[in-house]
Amino acid sequence: MFGPKFKVGWDGFYINLRPFKREEMGYFADMFSSPRVHEYTLQSRGFTQQMEEKWFDKAQENEDVYWAIEPEGHGKVVGSTGIHDINSSNSCHTGIIICDPSWWGKGVASRAHVARTWYALTYLDRATIQSEVMIENLGSRKALERVGYHITGRNPRVRRSGGMYVDSFSLCLISPLWLTRLYPAGLPEEYAESVQKVRNTLDRAKEVVELL
Ligand SMILES: CC(C)(COP(=O)(O)OP(=O)(O)OC[C@H]1O[C@@H](n2cnc3c(N)ncnc32)[C@H](O)[C@@H]1OP(=O)(O)O)[C@@H](O)C(=O)NCCC(=O)NCCS
């Protein structure tokens, strides 16, 4: 399915998270075919309009939540973010790809993560959120840690980047709304700092996420 429409931002820079449109699949496929964009993802092929239209049709029916990311005033999609594997352990996985490199390093992921985390923990009532980043992907790791994900382990040579085998980090975010159930004996000290960051993210979301 597609996520509902949100506007999120601060310091004069806002992005919209919104459902994809079928008519932008050709444009998206072109950006999504760049090997630069996929240096740290699991994809290594090109994409056509037809492939993306098929994905669009399927995406409407499955339980994953997808958003198109559109910077306010830009008028075009620049990337995609989503919540996947929404499972009976009240967990899920998240991912993001900004396919237009001219928008990297401008705070798009930092903004998207605030709205996505808030949505996953409140609307979807997730107790935990998981993610994975290749260790060289500093921007992705930083954006995740900022909203409260913490590294739970290093996975040796489980991914490939540019033809080389590389390590990845597993990350997890613990919902402060679930602490009594998750940790009846009290939250382990090692998670205190990251859970506080999640609290800050949820507080911030109240100020910076607008329902459209
Ligand atoms: C990785 C990615 C999601 C980051 O998104 P972004 O919008 O560029 O990230 P932001 O601008 O919000 O930056 C997040 C933080 O990382 C830092 N950062 C961004 N790019 C960085 C880089 N290449 N190296 C080091 N730090 C970087 C930013 O300075 C910021 O830190 P700060 O808040 O302390 O200033 C984006 O570059 C992307 O989609 N890349 C291609 C696909 C991909 O790798 N997806 C993630 C797979 S796990």
Image (cartoon, rainbow, N blue to C red):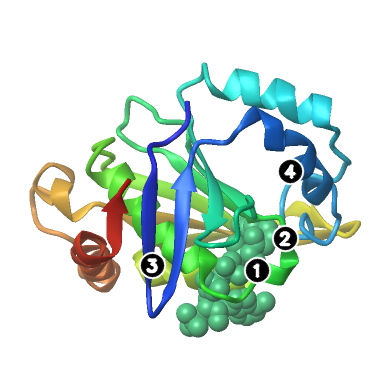
Residue on which the image places disc 1: 103
Q: Is there CB contact under 8 Å for labels 1 and 2?
A: yes
Distance in Å between CA atoms under marks 3 and 4: 23 Å
Q: Residues within 10 Å of mark 3 (few under 14, many from 20)?
A: many
Tag 1: residue type? Trp
The crowd level at tag 1 (other Cα within 10 Å; few <14, some 14-19, many 20+) is some
Q: Which label is found at residue 100? A: 2
Mark closer to the chain start, 1 or 4: 4
Q: Residue 148's image quarter?
A: bottom left
Q: What whole-number distance in Å separates the C-alpha atoms at marks 2 and 3? A: 19 Å
Q: Secondary structure at mark 1?
A: helix
Give the left or right position of residue 173, taking residue 80 as reference: left
Coordinates of residue 160 in the picture (x, y in percent): 80, 54
Mark 1 to mark 2 CA distance (whole Å): 6 Å
Decide which of tag 4 and tag 2 comes sooner along the chain.
Answer: 4
**Distance CA(mark 1)–CA(mark 4):** 14 Å
Indicate which disc residue 28 carries.
4
